[in-house]
Every structure is written in C-alpha cells, then in structure tokens.
Amino acid sequence: MSTLRGRGTVQGLPEWDRCAVMGVVNVTPDSFSDGGRWFDTTAAIKHGLDLVAEGADLIDVGGESTRPGASRVDASEELRRVVPVVKGLSSEGVTVSVDTMRARVAEESVAAGAALVNDVSGGLADPDMVRVVAAAGTPFVVMHWRGFSESMNSRAVYEDVVAEVVAELRERMDAVIADGVAPERIVIDPGLGFAKDAGHDLSLVAHLDELRALGRPLLVAASRKRFLGHVLADEGAAPPPARERDAATAAISALSARAGAWAVRVHEVRATADAVRVARAVEGAA
C-alpha cells in the first residue's frame, strides 16, 4: 500500500489527499517558541486565520505551555485564554483542535466549535478526559507521555526507545478504546521532546513506519523542538533559538509526510505546506 493511500482517515474530520498541516496558535505568555506573541484573543484569532491563508488545514489552539519545566496554569485561566479563540476561529469555518490536558477545557472548547481534542497526556493527566471525549464523540490525539513538564526530562530513560514508545502507545490506545472512544476517531503521536532526548527523537522520526503499524493515523509534532536545535548547533556552540529552526522543521515535515504521517504540527506554516505538497507529488510519481 502506498503512503498516500495508507495515511488513514479520522472519523469526524475532513479528509486530505496528502499529509495535513496543523498550524499552532499558542495563547500563552510563556511559549518556548513565540514568547507570548498571540496571547491577546484578537491577535490569536488573526494569527490562526493567517496560518490558514498560508496553507494550514487545521489550527491547534493551546492555553498552557508544555515546554520542559513549565508550571501548570489553573483551569479558569486556561478556559479564559482558549475558548474565545476556538469560538472565533470555528465561526470562520476553520477546523480547530484544542490542545489541552483538562477535560473541562476540552468539553467547553468542543461546545465552542473544536473538532479535535489534542491531549499531550493521552488522557492520563485528567481522569475525566476520556469520558468527556467519548461522550462528545470527538476525535482524540493520544500522545506518548510519561509525566508533566516539571519532571519529564528525568523520565527520558529507554533501552529501546522505538519499541518502548510503540508498546506504551499501544497500551494507552487500548485503554482509551476500552473507555469508550471509537478507534476510528483516534490519532497517535510519538510525543517528540516529551520525556525524550535528541537521540530518542531522531530515532522515532527514523522509524515512523513502526508507529504507523499501530494502525491509526499519525501526528508528528517536531516544530522548533530542542532536538532540531541540537542537530543545527555547531560543535561547542549553543543551539539556535526556536524561531530559527523553521527550515529544519520543514525538513522533518517532508520526511514525515513521505513516511505516511497523517499530519504535522508546526508553528511556521508556509514552508511546511510546500514541503508536504512536494512529498505528495513525489508519492504520486512513484
């Protein structure tokens, strides 16, 4: 089966004839990648619409930073940040994903128009999350996760990172299905940068086929992450800042698309939109 035919579809979401592009809107003052540039609701909505104009197929709205070491924001503040942006974008016809670990935020965002719940904990952080998603019938991203941002770096210990991530994702996916989420609505994400070092992340990108063997569409979220900074840094030099890693991100997007990823999640859309279209053209010519 070609990667073009084998990406999988997600019940409840549009179908694309190539790897989809998920644009990121961080409604936070402390994002590692954009430093709060879209913290204002109006600015965040405009940015989301700009990303769609640049080629994003869906927009992922998040109100809580998950960078390493970040402290959690309280639920009321996360709701205040996220729900108006979800509502504003969905009212413009945008396919919106909500990036949250809280069931209440997911529930209110879905009511405001979100079409997908992207939980970096895969439903582990909030015991009510899977119940809420199952009741709503909403597509759900199950990411590989070993703990909150404050402690995740200490959990980056593996004998075989690919085998262990696949096994842990399979276990979590099975649990989510057992708790009522339809298999056809599940997306999996290897969790690049979450309880993983640069070598782990690169190994996972090199073995996306093993993740796809889990049988569900695959989301790859590599944008501007530390492992790219590590790759780009000259020997003995500091990694380039996050916003100087977009060309490297587009390279990962092309590799992921060629490997059959369902979608890639990125901050800078235009280069990745071009990259996945080139990958699709190569697939079509094969």
Image (cartoon, grey):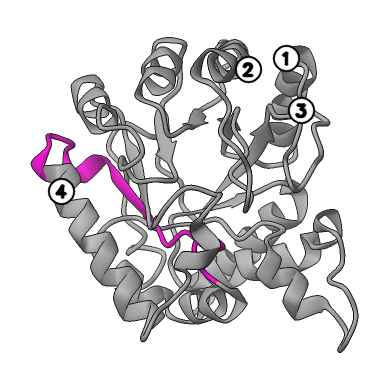
What amino acid is at disc 4? Ala
* Between 20 and 177, the one nearer to me in the picture: 177
* Secondary structure beneath label 4: helix
Q: Position of residue 246 (x, y in %)?
A: 78, 59
Q: Give the CA separation, mark 1 to mark 4.
A: 36 Å
Identify the mark nearer the N-term, 2 or 4. 2
Identify the mark nearer the N-term, 3 or 2. 3
Q: Give the CA separation, mark 3 to mark 4.
A: 36 Å
Q: Which mark is residue 175?
A: 4
Q: Is residue 73 left or right of residue 144?
A: right
What amino acid is at disc 1? Thr
Camera-near label (2 vs 1) is: 2
What amino acid is at disc 3? His
Q: Give the CA separation, mark 2 to mark 1.
A: 7 Å
Q: Is residue 35 left or right of residue 77?
A: right
Mark 1, residues whose alpha carbon is within 10 Å: few (<14), some, or many (≥20)?
some
Query: Residue beneath label 2, please?
Result: 81
Mark 4, residues whose alpha carbon is within 10 Å: few (<14), some, or many (≥20)?
some
Q: Position of residue 17 (x, y in %)?
A: 46, 52
> Could you tell me if residue 53 is visible in this image?
yes
Identify the mark nearer the N-term, 1 or 4. 1
Q: Is residue 223 above or below residue 22?
A: below
Residue 192, magenta (yes or no): yes
Query: Residue beneath label 3, please?
Result: 47
* Between 101 and 187, the one nearer to me in the picture: 101
Is the C-beta separation of discs 2 and 1 under 8 Å? yes
Magenta-colored span: 178-196
Query: Residue beneath label 1, please?
Result: 41
